[in-house]
Image (spheres, helix red, strand yellow):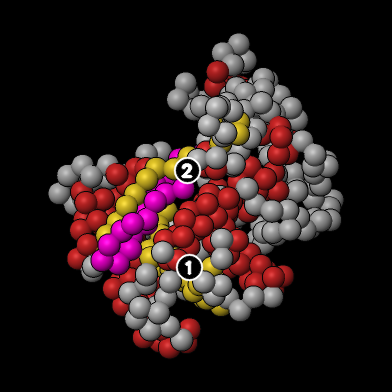
Amino acid sequence: MSNLKALSLFSGAGGMDIGLKKSGFNILADIEIDKFCCETLRAAVEREQTDTEVFETDIRQVNLPDLSKKLNIGKNNLDLLFGGPPCQPFSLAGKQAGLNDLRGPLLFEIIRFAEYLRPKVILIEQVKGLLSAKNSNGDRGGVFNLFISELERIGFVPKWKVCCAADYGVPQLRERLFFVATYAQNNFNFPESTHSPTSNLFGSLPYLTVGEVISDLDAPSRKIPGTNLFDRNDSHIDVTPARDRERISYVPEGSYLAAQTGVSSDIRCNLSSKDTTKYLRLNRNKPSNTLRCGEIFYHPTENRYLTPREYMRLHGYDDNYLLRGPIRARTGTVNNLDQHRQVANSVPPPLAEAIGKQIKIYLNE
């Protein structure tokens, strides 16, 4: 069981890769379309000196016979196929376009790979909204039911569970849906939680908090004046625009700007009571809200965005893992995923590791 072979789809910044490698899997290849995520993945391969191949391509264009030959994997020869397809089509925070979103059908690419490769186990991460996503007929839960039926059609038996990252030692109240499907039968058991809101008689530890994981970091760096360069490569970089520093200065710890009704309208601008995650200042004594692509959360006590490195701490990344690509201020734009969004899109490594260990137990049995 020391050379369990895995293939990563929709690899992103590699959060799930990290956890699964720690649980004993050898990642043969990453398939990812985002340019900057691929730069991050290649940097990890170079730093760790692994044999993982990074394919920067649209997954729909992957020729499975060619891939199978290149990686030397045939049917029933792959231990784990895993990935987290784009979640935006099914997210409750988005438009919930489901399969009508161009990214929606990408979920079913996993079926294509699984049908050809016949892995022993499939692991998939998605947002909770998939459970209620409507199909093309408008049936609530229709996409979920179709996906389950497709897994069953090709011989896999799925189990699923909504897991909160904070329950597994990640200082973030992030809930995501995980599928584990195994061929012909399913004796898999999801991991028991190790943490809870407070310690209890059953031995669980209290949730980690924002302050516990970021308080020992030094002061972040800023851009070198007159350039777009930084004097460090660990992503602990502050790119907060001056106007945003001013606006967040009116927000107390643990609150958000729209709740500050006494602040002038030129500071609050067009924020409504529903804007609870915009200009949100985290609380040192609680786990973070779910990191999202739309906004960057603010430091509990300083008038600035959290840096990508602080985001990585809140997601459970090790400090030796380095991101590549731009760090975007909210007033700027970049193509593909900037560093904050690379983290927010990824699976927290400790949660992936916990599930990976259970998959390894299943395979061993």
Q: Secondary structure at mark 1?
A: strand
Image-based side of 343 in relation to 79, left or right: right
Across and down, in percent, residue 102 comes to 33, 59
Q: Which residue is mark 2?
A: 192
Report the amino acid beneath label 2: Glu
**Extent of the magenta region:** 174-191
Q: Judge whether residue 184 is colored magenta.
A: yes
Q: Nearer the viewer, residue 283 or 334?
A: 283
Q: Judge whether residue 302 is colored magenta.
A: no
Across and down, in percent, residue 56 comes to 52, 73
Q: Locate the C terminus by quadrant.
A: bottom left
Q: Which residue is mark 1?
A: 8
Q: Earlier in the sequence, mark 1 or mark 2?
A: 1
Cβ–Cβ under 8 Å for marks 1 and 2: no
Q: Is residue 29 visible?
A: no
Across and down, in percent, residue 197 comes to 55, 28
